[in-house]
Image (cartoon, coloured by chain):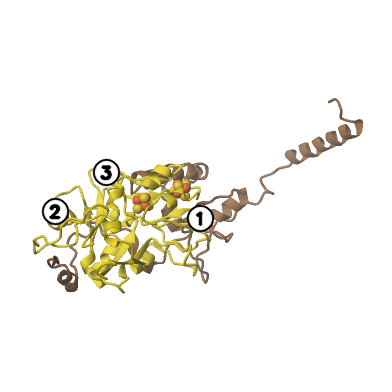
Amino acid sequence: MSATDTSRRRFLTGAAAAAAGLAVAPGVFLMPLAQARRAGEPASSDVRWGLLVDTTRCSDGCDACVRACKEENGWEGVGRPRTDAQWIRKVKVRDPRTGHTQSLPLMCQHCKHPPCVDVCPTAASMKRADGIVLVDKHVCIGCRYCMMACPYKARSFIHEDVHDQRAHAPRGKGTVESCTLCVHRVDAGRVPACVEACAAEGGGALVFGDLKDPSSEISRRLAAHGAEEIRADLGLDTGVRYYGI
Amino acid sequence: MRGVTAKTGRALALLALVALGAMARPAAAEVPKPKLPPAKGEKCVEPTEVMRRKHMAYLLHQRDDTLRRGIRGGKYSLRECLECHVTAQPGKPLPTYGSPEHFCSACHRYAAVHIDCFSCHRDRPEPEAARAGGPAPADGLTGRTLPARTLKVLGPVEVKP
Ligand code: SF4
Ligand code: SF4
């Protein structure tokens, strides 16, 4: 966990933060009812998967999302913090003017205009039609350009041989990896592991759903309360949004 | 053949003779076949002869469909190969690709083919208990009951000014 001291608010939200203090619509249900795609059907651009983080419900000291991600996708540090894989991490941010601190999870933001995809020389770094940004490890050459390009430090390079991977989450030495938005679950009509864990044992801070469907839980929450992108000034149109920062 | 001495010429001729002799010998009986471990399941997705020649092409084609286009449920899945072909032998753990008793390994060693699949992919089926991340119930989350605590923490959001 790291404390960010320099002009946290502007850094985080880019341009001026939207005014807080909106009226609250009660009785919203959290879990989206995702539908599994039929076999043989490709991901569609009629959908854009997104994640809303309600930071007012996320507490320092809780790492249910991180643990769930590790277990689901089979990544774990090997005791070398500088290079260990991190698909998702908890970050503590602090406003130096007021001393107010906040804790939030940070992972691949599934940018609509992903710089990691722009710079990849082999097209390994790619965005699926439904907005999920992935690394095609079949063609990743491990050059790590994408790691340099990502403003969120969301990607990790694998330095060691990997064994006993999860069947649905291949990962190996010499390639780069990051949060897949649990694409294997999403395709099966389920929500990402972190969302499930946060609802069950965390603060219920994560909402997953289709940003293009105005009736989805995430869209309704965004319409009612708004949310910020981290580094919105970069214009990447992230799929992960933060409420309360 | 200019530049080839008589001596080398004779040696080459001799070599050619030896090679011809080797080819003339009945091969089938003497070449050992790879020892393949037994498989589960009724039959493969294609006839054995076809799979032997084309499995790599099927997998190569489908990997792009699956990963890049998000098409699930295709006919040729590496995971499904392993489900049937990598089975536990009595008293032994499931073999890894490093073992000659692994189905893929047995043949690739025999044919001296180096593959990279298993530097990223799991090389054997997952234990039953670890398959939570696998295929979901057919209807996904629909109709699932969430724990009471979940519903409680999902109440209205309070916004501080
Ligand atoms: S957050 Fe980083 S890794 Fe994810 S899409 Fe954006 S640039 Fe790529
Ligand atoms: S490390 Fe892999 S995914 Fe990243 S830019 Fe290089 S080839 Fe592309």
Quarter of the figure with residue A228: bottom left
The colour one sees for chain A in the rendered image is yellow
| Tag in front: 1 or 2 | 2
* A148 sits to left or right of B152: right
Q: Are marks 3 and 2 in contact (CB under 8 Å)?
A: no
Residue A6 x %, y %: 33, 62
Q: Secondary structure at mark 1?
A: helix
For label 1, the residue is B118
Which colour denotes chain B? brown
* Amino acid type for the residue under numbered disc 2: Ala
Whether residue A182 is situated above or below residue A130 in the rendered picture: below
Report in which chain the residue with disc 1 lies. Answer: B
Q: Is residue B153 left or right of residue A115?
A: left
Of the two numbered discs 3 and 2 in the rendering, the one whose residue sits closer to the viewer: 2
Q: Which residue is mark 2?
A: A223
Q: Nearer the viewer, residue A121 or A172?
A: A121
**How dense is the environment of label 1, judged by Cα within 10 Å: few (below 14), some, or many (20 and up)?**
some
Disc 3 is placed on an element classified as loop
From the viewer's perspective, tell me whether residue A212 is left or right of residue A160. Answer: left
Local crowd size for mark 2, using a 10 Å CA cut-off: few (<14), some (14–19), many (≥20)? few
Helix or strand or loop: what does disc 2 sit on? helix
Residue where numbered disc 3 is placed: A44
Identify the chain of the residue marked 2, using the numbered disc in the image.
Answer: A
The answer, for residue A204, to whether it is visible in the render is no
Identify the amino acid type marked 1: Phe
Q: Residue furthest right?
A: B6
Q: Quadrant of the N terminus of chain A?
A: bottom left
